[in-house]
C-alpha cells in the first residue's frame, strides 16, 4: 500500500489484473465525525472500502439471495436472526424447503414437528430455538404471502413485510436486500452495530428496535460516502465481525482459568 499526501493507494488482484484502489487521507472525514483511517488497520472505514472494492473486483456478480421465491426468502430470514447461529437457521430452512413444506397448504403442526427434530451441528446435534413460535409465524406469513400483491420497490416492500407476524425492521430489510438485491435498505444486526461502534458511526449504547431507521439512515450515508454498495458493506461487516466473535470465544475457552 502507498500513502501520499491527500490519499492512500491500496493494491489488489482483480479479474483484469492488478488494480489500484484510491482512498482519501486517513485524517479526512468520510462523514462528519468519522475519519477514514488507514486501510492497513482493521475495521477502519478505509479497511471496509478496500474490502468491498476488492470483493467487487474479484466477483462479477454479487447476490445475497438464498430463496428462489419471496416465501422462501422470508423463511430464510425468519428462521435465522437474533440469537440463532446462521448455520442452524439455514439448516432449518433447507429442511423445510427440501421437504416441500414452504407453501400455504402445509399445516402449522407439520412445520412445528420439522423444527422440533434435532439438527446435526458441530459434530453433534442441536435443537432449534422456539420451534412453536417460529412455526406459527412462518405458517401465518405464508398464508398472507400466497395471495398478496406485493410492492416491487424496496421501501414499500419492507413496509409491507414489517406488518407480517414475527417480522421487524431488520428481518424485513434482510428479505428486501436479498430478494431485490437492494442497496436502499440495510441489515443492521449486532455484528454490524459492533463494526459501526468501532469507527464512531454508531454511539456506544443504542436501542436497535427503537432507533433502527435513524441508524440505518446513517449507515446508508456512510456507504454512499465510501462509494460502495450498502448491501455488500453490511454483508462484509457481518461476516468479519461474526468470525472475530467466534475466534474470541474459542480463545476464551482455551485460556487457562
Image: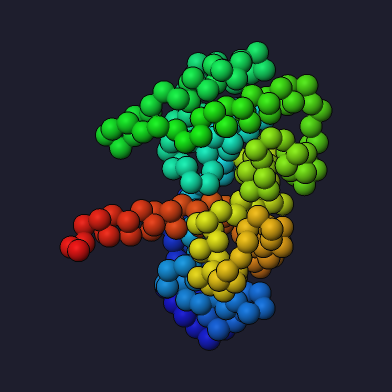
Query: What residue is at 55 percent from the left and 21 percent from the top?
Result: 111
Determine if residue 53 is in view.
no
Count of numbered labels shown in the rendering: 0
Determine whether 140 is above or below 221 in the image: above
Q: Nearer the viewer, residue 62 or 32?
A: 32
Q: Position of residue 221 (x, y in %)?
A: 69, 65
Query: What residue is at 48 percent from the left and 25 percent from the top?
Result: 115
Tell me the quarter of the image containing the C terminus: bottom left
Query: What residue is at 45 percent from the left and 58 percent from the top?
Result: 241
Determine whether 93 is above or below 32 in the image: above
Identify the coloring.
rainbow
Query: What residue is at 55 percent from the left and 66 percent from the top?
Result: 196
Q: Position of residue 224 (x, y in %)?
A: 68, 63
Q: In the image, is 130 to the left or to the right of 230?
A: left
Determine if residue 170 is in view.
yes
Q: Nearer the viewer, residue 80 or 150?
A: 80
Tell me the quarter of the image containing the N terminus: bottom left
Residue ranking furthest to the left: 256
Q: In the image, is 33 to the left or to the right of 198?
A: right
Q: Quadrant of residue 32?
A: bottom right
Determine whether 93 is above or below 189 in the image: above
Q: Nearer the viewer, residue 156 or 28?
A: 156
Q: Position of residue 237 (x, y in %)?
A: 51, 57
Residue ranking furthest to the top: 105
Q: Position of residue 186 (x, y in %)?
A: 65, 53
Amino acid at each position: 500500500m502507498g500513502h501520499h499526501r491527500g490519499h492512500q493507494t491500496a493494491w489488489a488482484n482483480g479479474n483484469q489484473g492488478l488494480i489500484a484502489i484510491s482512498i482519501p487521507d486517513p485524517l479526512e472525514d468520510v462523514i462528519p465525525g468519522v475519519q477514514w483511517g488507514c486501510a492497513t488497520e482493521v475495521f477502519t472505514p478505509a479497511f471496509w472500502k478496500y474490502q468491498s472494492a476488492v470483493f467487487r473486483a474479484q466477483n462479477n456478480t454479487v447476490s445475497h439471495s438464498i430463496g428462489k421465491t419471496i416465501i422462501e426468502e422470508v423463511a430464510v430470514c425468519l428462521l435465522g436472526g437474533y440469537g440463532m447461529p446462521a448455520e442452524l437457521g439455514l439448516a432449518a430452512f433447507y429442511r423445510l424447503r427440501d421437504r416441500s413444506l414452504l407453501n400455504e397448504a402445509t399445516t402449522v403442526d407439520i412445520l412445528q414437528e420439522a423444527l422440533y427434530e434435532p439438527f446435526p451441528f458441530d459434530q453433534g446435534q442441536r435443537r432449534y430455538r422456539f420451534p412453536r413460535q417460529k412455526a406459527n409465524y412462518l405458517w401465518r406469513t405464508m398464508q398472507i404471502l400466497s395471495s398478496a400483491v406485493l410492492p416491487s420497490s424496496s421501501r414499500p416492500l419492507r413496509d409491507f413485510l414489517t406488518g407480517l407476524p414475527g417480522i421487524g425492521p431488520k428481518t424485513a430489510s434482510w428479505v428486501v436486500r436479498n430478494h431485490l438485491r437492494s442497496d436502499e435498505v440495510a441489515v443492521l444486526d449486532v455484528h454490524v452495530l459492533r463494526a459501526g461502534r468501532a469507527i464512531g458511526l454508531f454511539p456506544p449504547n443504542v436501542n436497535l428496535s427503537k432507533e433502527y431507521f435513524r441508524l440505518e439512515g446513517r449507515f446508508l450515508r456512510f456507504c454512499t460516502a465510501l462509494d460502495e454498495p450498502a448491501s455488500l458493506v453490511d454483508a462484509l461487516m457481518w461476516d468479519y465481525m461474526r468470525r472475530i466473535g467466534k475466534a474470541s470465544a474459542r480463545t476464551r475457552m482455551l485460556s487457562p482459568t
